[in-house]
Image: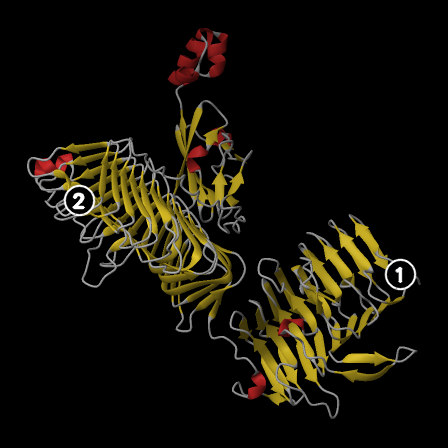
Amino acid sequence: MPCCQLMARARRLKIRADITTHGTVNVLLADKGAEASNSGNILIYGSSGDTGDDRSAITRANGEDTVVHNKAGADITLFSNQTPEFINGINIYPERWYTHTLYAMLATQGGSVVNDKGATVHLQGAGAYGVSASVGTALNEGDIYLDGFIPTLDDENNIISTDYWQPTYLYLTSSAMVAGSSDIGYGDATAINTGTITVNNAGFGMMALSGGTAVNQGTITLTADEGVTGEENQLVGMAALNGGTVVNDTTGTINIDADYGQAFLSDSNSYIINNGAINLNGSPMDENDPHMGSMPTDKIWIRSLPGSGDSDSQTSEAGFFTTGALANYGNETLNGDLDVSGWLYNEAGATLTVNGDMAINNAGNMENHGTMHADTITTYHSLFNRADGSLTTDLLTLNGDITLFNEGSFTGSIAGTSYTQEVVNTGNMTVAEDGKSLINGSFAFYNQEGATLTNSGSAVEGGENTIINMTRTSSSIAQVNSGTITATNGYSAITTANASNSPMWIWNTETGVINGINPDAPLINLSRGYSFGNEGTINVQGDNAVAISGGTSSYIIDLVNSGTINVGTEQGQIDGTNGTGLIGIKGNGNATTINNTADGVINVYANDSYAFGGQSKTIINNGEVNLLCDTGCGIYAPGTTGTQDDHNGTADIVIPDAIVAPTQGDIPAPPADPNAPQMLSNYIVGTNADGSSGTLKANNLMIGDDVKVNTGFTAGTAETTVVVDNAFTGSNIQGADNITSTSVVWNAQGSTDGDGNVDITMTKNAYADVATESSVSDVAQALDAGIPTMSCTTA
């Protein structure tokens, strides 16, 4: 029959006819929750005459709750005599960038495709993929046959010869099943084989790419035609590439019946788990046999993390790894290294401890709302420590164009290896190790208003001994402080290496405060390539301390104060901790200009200390210098050089506007808490005259404020206090205090017993206390006195 695309939307569509087409085509699309099926035979001849973008999914399920079945007795056959070519990116396809690629069945955007038991898929050629999913689920219960050799067909479409095409990249290899995407961030899929897959001559049985997991619970068999010889990675049972994970499950079997066949293939970012059987020429294969190919990992696969209220501890010398999104709501301890692929969430109130090194790889991300500790953390993606989060590590290493957003508490050191990295702090950051810097390397730093940076350790000989340590030498990178930096115990606040000949500004903005107490080196210790603009407040104390020191350079450097610099402090003057020999701004180059602008104030509280010093081209003072010491202080330190332009009309240098911190973008929602309480509402605990009651059995239950207990028990007792035992039984039952009575005469009070069950104590109120009208008060008092109601009524 003539072929066109058939579409099912929100209804069922069944194909029972046979369809044959020359040239690629999309035959069947199920969308928006629809279900579609093929019960006929679909035969596709991909032609080398096709040009342009001809990638196709012969059948596709697109969207959540959408499914396409290849039914028992049906067949989908693809012939392709083309080879994949790079063209442009289309996100729905696993091979995102390549045309001349064909998919027999493809799940996208959360859909599902199923090759049913008794159904078949035949694939011949390069760029041919069977039951696949980029985002969604692919299931093979039937049979898939793949021959990766490119066919040459005669006029009657008979194969007259075949040739091997060596893929330019391994992930382009034809595969019976595919899960995930060639690119990070576009794959979230699972492929499961419970049927049989046969791969002849060339190709992969199952392939997992980025965001994909392929699981074999059936049989994969590798064969070759007589006389065919192959090469490494040509004929593979299961391949994990670009960050994918493959699992040969406990019921899975891989049969290798070809000399050049191999069970597994993986790259350095992917994982192989083998819990099944591998046979070579009909006999069990030794795990050290070269036909194994890439070796399976010994790392433990973390599939889930504790729910709220739960705890877990695991130990592995080989370490651990994750795939996909995981959220920790409880307490997890991992004794060993951890590799993270996909999102890792540590939620509020949760604790995650990694007694080892944590690596957040190219497919990983992390958001922390709880308490987290790892010996070291290496990340290739932006990291988010939220306001309620506490993150502790000896060393956090940032790689590539990424950002650390710290809103909470961070303790440790950070290494930045690229000038494209950024640190944005709106919380509190502390370096605890003696001599270590808080941030070291190449990075742009933004300490925002209200945020703090500090050190709790002490300076040591040969140490970095500074909170911010900029080591980049090829070019300068801007830094902005709008919060508070406090350097103590011999530490400097900011130190830079010699960098660009064209200076970059470092800002202490109007809200910025930089405190230095006994720094061994200048508090702001600049080298070539940096100018400094102070619009906030800088306080420095300690013998021979310098607040701002310019770089030693013959290139132009500007050191500008439009805020306040306190050389010593008023309190330090009182308690004698200011020291002597301090300098506010010190130049170190014959092209350096020091400028205390008209808005600038320098207060000299320390004895024998000065506002300006060192070598400079010019010192421009249009602001205030207040000599508030007891003795020996002055404007210029002995040996100060440079033209002194003091209120003589010389124009001030204008500090440019500070650069703005990057924004965060959107964060995907974490997986749900498996122990999240379910809300109970509009429920009544029934009681009986014999004292029995209804019991609700449930775990993780939240009792709502409209849950009540009735007073059926009053028909069998005159007691004024009655306990309803085990009205709710189970674990993690919350909200017992919300239970009330259906009657104003009885008060209900819920409580949790030692087993975690909820009992209810019913206490009778005095009738006089609940009567609200004076006309019935006598009746209420009579009832409280024990007079029968009828007598009260007659009276």
| Cα distance between the residues tagged 2 and 1 | 85 Å
Percent coordinates x, y for residue 571 in the rendering: 13, 35
* Label 1 element class: loop
Task: From the viewer's perspective, tell me whether residue 764 is left or right of residue 212.
Answer: left
In the picture, the disc for residue 3 is 1
Residue 199, relative to residue 454: is it above or below? below
Task: From the viewer's perspective, tell me whether residue 769 is left or right of residue 107.
Answer: left
Residue 154, relative to residue 103: is it above or below? below
Asked if residue 367 shows in the view, the reply is: yes
For the residue marked with disc 1, what is the amino acid? Cys
* Mark positioned earlier in the residue sequence (2 or 1): 1
Q: Residues within 10 Å of mark 1 (few under 14, many from 20)?
A: few
Quadrant of the rendered structure where residue 559 is? top left
Total marks shown come to: 2
In the picture, the disc for residue 583 is 2
| Nearer to me, 121 or 52 | 52
Q: Residue furthest bottom?
A: 227
